[in-house]
Amino acid sequence: MTPAVPTALTIGYGHAELLPVHFDDLDPMGMLHNARYALLVERALATFWRHHGHTFSDGRPTTTDAFNVVKELTIRYHAPIRGPGDVVVHFWVEHMGTSCAVYPGPGPL
Protein backbone atom coordinates (compact mmCIF):
# COMPACT_ATOMS: atom_id res chain seq x y z
CA MET A 1 0.00 0.00 0.00
CA THR A 2 1.29 3.48 -0.89
CA PRO A 3 0.62 6.44 1.41
CA ALA A 4 -1.44 9.27 -0.03
CA VAL A 5 0.72 12.10 -1.35
CA PRO A 6 -0.77 15.54 -1.96
CA THR A 7 -0.44 16.62 -5.57
CA ALA A 8 -1.00 20.33 -4.85
CA LEU A 9 -0.99 22.47 -1.75
CA THR A 10 -3.98 24.76 -1.37
CA ILE A 11 -3.28 28.01 0.45
CA GLY A 12 -5.02 31.38 0.54
CA TYR A 13 -1.93 33.47 -0.21
CA GLY A 14 1.81 33.18 -0.74
CA HIS A 15 3.59 30.01 -1.71
CA ALA A 16 4.06 26.64 -0.01
CA GLU A 17 6.77 24.05 -0.55
CA LEU A 18 6.62 20.47 0.71
CA LEU A 19 10.08 19.54 2.00
CA PRO A 20 11.47 16.47 3.75
CA VAL A 21 12.76 16.43 7.32
CA HIS A 22 15.39 13.75 7.75
CA PHE A 23 16.43 11.86 10.87
CA ASP A 24 19.74 13.76 11.01
CA ASP A 25 17.79 17.07 11.15
CA LEU A 26 16.49 16.11 14.60
CA ASP A 27 17.89 16.96 18.01
CA PRO A 28 18.37 14.35 20.79
CA MET A 29 14.69 14.81 21.81
CA GLY A 30 13.48 13.85 18.32
CA MET A 31 12.41 17.37 17.35
CA LEU A 32 13.71 19.44 14.45
CA HIS A 33 16.91 21.13 15.62
CA ASN A 34 16.42 24.89 15.91
CA ALA A 35 19.15 25.63 13.33
CA ARG A 36 17.38 23.45 10.75
CA TYR A 37 14.33 25.75 10.57
CA ALA A 38 16.39 28.37 8.74
CA LEU A 39 17.70 25.66 6.41
CA LEU A 40 14.13 24.62 5.54
CA VAL A 41 13.26 28.24 4.69
CA GLU A 42 16.37 28.52 2.51
CA ARG A 43 15.51 25.29 0.69
CA ALA A 44 11.91 26.41 0.14
CA LEU A 45 13.02 29.74 -1.33
CA ALA A 46 15.65 28.07 -3.53
CA THR A 47 13.06 25.60 -4.82
CA PHE A 48 10.61 28.42 -5.55
CA TRP A 49 13.19 30.44 -7.50
CA ARG A 50 14.44 27.34 -9.34
CA HIS A 51 10.90 26.69 -10.60
CA HIS A 52 10.87 30.29 -11.86
CA GLY A 53 14.09 29.93 -13.86
CA HIS A 54 16.65 31.27 -11.38
CA THR A 55 19.15 28.48 -10.74
CA PHE A 56 22.90 27.89 -10.51
CA SER A 57 25.24 26.29 -13.02
CA ASP A 58 28.93 25.70 -12.28
CA GLY A 59 28.51 27.63 -9.02
CA ARG A 60 27.17 30.75 -10.71
CA PRO A 61 23.62 32.13 -11.06
CA THR A 62 21.96 31.38 -14.40
CA THR A 63 20.38 34.85 -14.41
CA THR A 64 22.37 38.04 -13.91
CA ASP A 65 19.53 40.07 -12.41
CA ALA A 66 18.49 37.88 -9.47
CA PHE A 67 20.35 36.59 -6.46
CA ASN A 68 19.62 36.31 -2.75
CA VAL A 69 21.49 37.91 0.11
CA VAL A 70 20.08 37.59 3.62
CA LYS A 71 20.17 40.82 5.59
CA GLU A 72 18.18 39.61 8.59
CA LEU A 73 16.57 36.38 9.73
CA THR A 74 14.17 36.12 12.65
CA ILE A 75 12.40 32.90 13.57
CA ARG A 76 9.43 32.50 15.87
CA TYR A 77 8.68 28.90 16.81
CA HIS A 78 4.92 28.25 16.98
CA ALA A 79 4.99 24.47 17.28
CA PRO A 80 7.72 21.82 17.22
CA ILE A 81 8.30 19.57 14.25
CA ARG A 82 8.52 16.10 15.75
CA GLY A 83 10.18 13.34 13.80
CA PRO A 84 11.14 12.83 10.18
CA GLY A 85 8.67 13.24 7.33
CA ASP A 86 7.39 15.96 5.03
CA VAL A 87 6.69 19.47 6.26
CA VAL A 88 5.00 22.41 4.50
CA VAL A 89 6.97 25.66 4.43
CA HIS A 90 4.64 28.61 3.73
CA PHE A 91 6.09 31.98 2.77
CA TRP A 92 5.04 35.15 0.97
CA VAL A 93 6.43 38.51 -0.11
CA GLU A 94 5.43 41.37 2.16
CA HIS A 95 7.30 44.08 0.27
CA MET A 96 8.89 44.18 -3.19
CA GLY A 97 11.34 47.00 -3.80
CA THR A 98 13.54 47.82 -6.77
CA SER A 99 16.45 45.86 -5.32
CA CYS A 100 14.97 43.86 -2.45
CA ALA A 101 12.10 41.69 -1.28
CA VAL A 102 10.87 41.13 2.26
CA TYR A 103 9.53 37.69 3.15
CA PRO A 104 7.72 37.84 6.52
CA GLY A 105 7.01 34.10 6.51
CA PRO A 106 7.19 31.29 6.98
CA GLY A 107 4.06 30.87 8.95
CA PRO A 108 1.77 28.08 9.98
CA LEU A 109 -0.86 26.87 7.54
Image (spheres, rainbow, N blue to C red):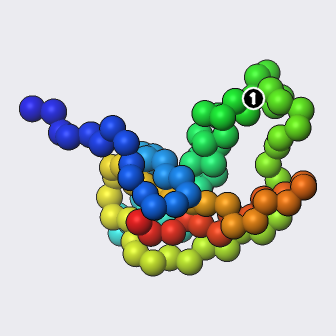
Front-most of 31 and 89?
Answer: 89
Front-most of 10 and 46?
Answer: 10
Instruction: Please tell me whether residue 98 is drawn above or below residue 47 in the rendered image.
Output: below
Mark 1 Cα-neighbour bin, 10 Å: few <14, some 14–19, many ≥20? few
Instruction: Please tell me whether residue 92 is drawn above or below residue 19 in the rendered image.
Output: below
Residue drawn at x 76%, y 22% is 57
Instruction: Please tell me whether residue 80 is drawn above or below residue 43 in the rendered image.
Output: below
Left or right for 63, reference 47: right
Q: Position of residue 33 (x, y in %)?
A: 49, 64
Helix, strand or loop status at disc 1: strand
Q: Position of residue 101 (x, y in %)?
A: 78, 59
Q: Position of residue 34 (x, y in %)?
A: 53, 68
Residue extending farthest to the top is 58
Residue drawn at x 59%, y 66% is 105
Left or right for 11, reference 64: left
Rendered-image quadrant of the C terminus: bottom left
Residue drawn at x 39%, y 71% is 80
Kind of residue at badge 1: Phe
Left or right for 52, reference 37: right
Q: How many marks?
A: 1
Q: Is residue 28 visible?
A: no
Residue 37, by quadrant, is bottom right
Residue wearing tag 1: 56
